[in-house]
Image (cartoon, helix red, strand yellow):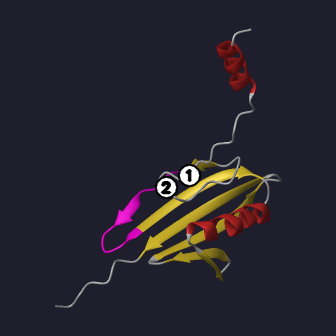
């Protein structure tokens, strides 16, 4: 067998790597494994920015919460809790995650990202 054919066979036989997917309106917010974005909502912009998104996937809310608690600090977010939501803060950005059980084995994740406007100099 030629080297080229051997290398081609090796590449084809290698297991597929799971590719990280992200929310369309929040390109640096990863989706948990097995989740798909649904109901992509409009982005509101003015003197700040407000983005809403939803995803649905398998599992329970605890696994989704654990995913974000482990992942988001690596992306510069710090965690907090507020009114039943999981909340993360990063600079002028505030991220709210709401989890709702759908049936016995699915979870709906609602996301709200609010970005405060940059401070304006009063000259």
Q: Estimate the x, y position of residue 26 in percent, counting from the top left.
A: 49, 58
Farthest front residue in view? 3
Q: Nearer the viewer, residue 38 or 2?
A: 2
Judged left or right of residue 99, residue 44 is left
Mark 1 surroundings: few (<14), some (14-19) or many (≥20) residues within 10 A: some
Give the number of the disc on residue 65. Answer: none
Q: Which quarter of the figure has residue 44?
A: bottom left
40 or 117: nearer the eye? 117
Is residue 13 shown above or below 47?
above
SS under mark 2: loop
Q: Residue at x 60, y 62 (%)?
A: 110
Residue 19 horizontal/vertical position (percent): 63, 43
Q: Principal SS element in the magenta part?
A: loop
Residue 9 location (% of width, % of height): 72, 18
Q: Which residue is mark 1?
A: 22
On screen, residue 76 versus residue 103, left or right, reads left
Which of 89/18 is in front?
18
Which of 121/62 is in front? 121
Image-quadrant location for residue 72: bottom right
Magenta span of residues: 39-49
Is residue 107 on the magenta stretch? no
Residue at the top extreme of this rendering: 1
Task: Give the tally of numbered discs.
Answer: 2
* Local crowd size for mark 2, using a 10 Å CA cut-off: few (<14), some (14–19), many (≥20): few
Q: Quadrant of the N terminus?
A: top right
Q: Do labels 1 and 2 touch, CB within 8 Å?
A: yes
> Looking at the rendering, in which quadrant would you find the C terminus?
bottom left
- Residue at 40% x, 60% y is 43
Q: Earlier in the sequence, mark 1 or mark 2?
A: 1
Give the alpha-carbon distance from disc 1 to disc 2, as whole Å: 6 Å
Give the residue number, with chain letter if any, for mark 2: 27
User: Residue placed at 69% from the left, 39% from the top?
Assistant: 17
């Amino acid at each position: 067998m030629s080297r080229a054919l051997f290398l081609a066979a090796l590449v084809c036989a290698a297991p597929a790597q799971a590719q990280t997917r992200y929310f369309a309106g929040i390109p640096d917010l990863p989706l948990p494994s097995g989740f798909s974005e649904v109901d992509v909502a409009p982005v509101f912009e003015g003197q700040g920015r407000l983005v809403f998104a939803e995803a649905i996937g398998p599992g329970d809310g605890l696994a989704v919460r654990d995913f974000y608690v482990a992942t988001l600090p690596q992306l510069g977010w710090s965690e907090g809790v507020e009114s039943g939501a999981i909340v993360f803060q990063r600079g002028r950005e505030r991220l709210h995650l709401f989890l709702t059980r759908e049936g016995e084995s699915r979870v709906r994740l609602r996301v709200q990202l609010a970005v405060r406007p940059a401070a304006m100099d009063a000259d």
